[in-house]
Amino acid sequence: MAVYVVLANQLFSPESFFYVSSYSVNLLGKYLCYALLALALDLVWGYCGILSLGHGAFFALGGYAMGMYLMRQIGDRGVYGNPDLPDFMVFLNWESLPWFWVGSDSFFWVIAMVVLAPGVLAYVFGAMAFRSRVSGVYLSIMTQAMTYALMLAFFRNEMGFGGNNGMTDFKDILGFSLQSDTTRLVLFIITVCVLAAAYYVSDRIVSSKAGKVITAIRDAENRVRFVGYNSASYKVFLFTFSAVLAGIAGALYVPQVGIINPGEFSPINSIEIVIWVAIGGRGTLYGAIIGAIVVSFAKTRLTGIMPEAWLFALGGLFVLVTLLLPKGLVGLIDHRFPVKRKVNKQEAAS
């Protein structure tokens, strides 16, 4: 799909039936950011049984890190013409950059923050929760509370992240205009490559010995502990890695959409991610990607036709899939085209 989109955008004229517009390229790039976010959640929910309702927070933290860098790139081209302070800081009478904005004009800084901000938060939260053996619905509520608390904090102007309006009016990235069709196409290609790399690494993790232990933790954690494995360490590792993927998705999302605000922390957004994974197929990796793209495409279409009916359609789709397709959309594919796997002698004998 990615190869076709790139070629169709570059080789065909706008009058051609096969032409893919720059708007569509930008829209598909946003869908693939959602797919990376769904992949991150599927890792912890589908393979480890951790139903996180807080992955929207990790996504937003990565987005804010990228937004800070993009705001610094505006320089004196802002509304107030201040070369050092973003427009919202000038409006709020800030005299200097806060300490946590120091270095935000460096692209290497933003790469580090995209990984560290969600990663450190997930590690600290996971270490406290998993080592205290919090699980099930209690863990889900805690992740949702964390997201809601961050949303309330980022809404405050004194936090230094733009308050209710967030960050927008980005001009360029690494010297390339974000309004350029070429830049949008390059961002789409980068998103495709990152999603492919994330899928490969995630598949290697779940296929490894550690992955088998993680799946066993999902099915019978007490037995895993009795055998001698430290289940908390595996859960902290996977939760942190998943949060980093979510943060990267947020960082790729912001330059393609052009805005980041506290609404991304909304618990509703995190619940919608769960719906993507459930509809696509939990515990399959590729199912999460399919679910995110299909639901996002449906949302774009239906909100344009019937804006008020979209939430009812999403809820109805979730209920129907839960009742009729417990394995999600990919369950239809697996049923229609079953995958043959190698069976060793011990399995055959049992």
Image (cartoon, helix red, strand yellow):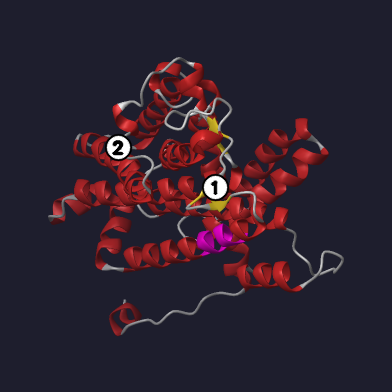
Q: Residue drawn at (47%, 39%), measured in percent from left and top?
A: 67
Residue appearing at x 15%, y 56% in the figure: 227
At mark 1, the secondary structure is strand
Q: Looking at this view, name the residue that lies furthest to the right.
A: 15
Residue 261 in the image: state x and y as whole percent. 53, 30
Residue 183's x, y, as percent? 59, 57
Task: Give the mark nearest the N terminus, 2 or 1.
Answer: 2
Reading the image, the residue beneath label 1 is 172
Read off the magenta span: 185-192
Q: In the image, what residue occupies the spot 40% across and 24% down?
A: 160
* Rendered image: mark on residue 182: none
Question: Which is nearer the eye, 234 or 199?
Answer: 199
Q: Quadrant of the N terminus?
A: bottom right
- Which residue position is annotated with label 2? 121
Residue at the limit of the structure toward the bottom, as seen here: 345
**Crowding near the residue tagged with mark 2, few <14, some 14–19, many ≥20 C-alpha atoms within 10 Å:** some
Residue, far left? 228
- 207 to 158, vertically: above or below: below
Instruction: Answer whether residue 33 is magenta in the image.
Output: no
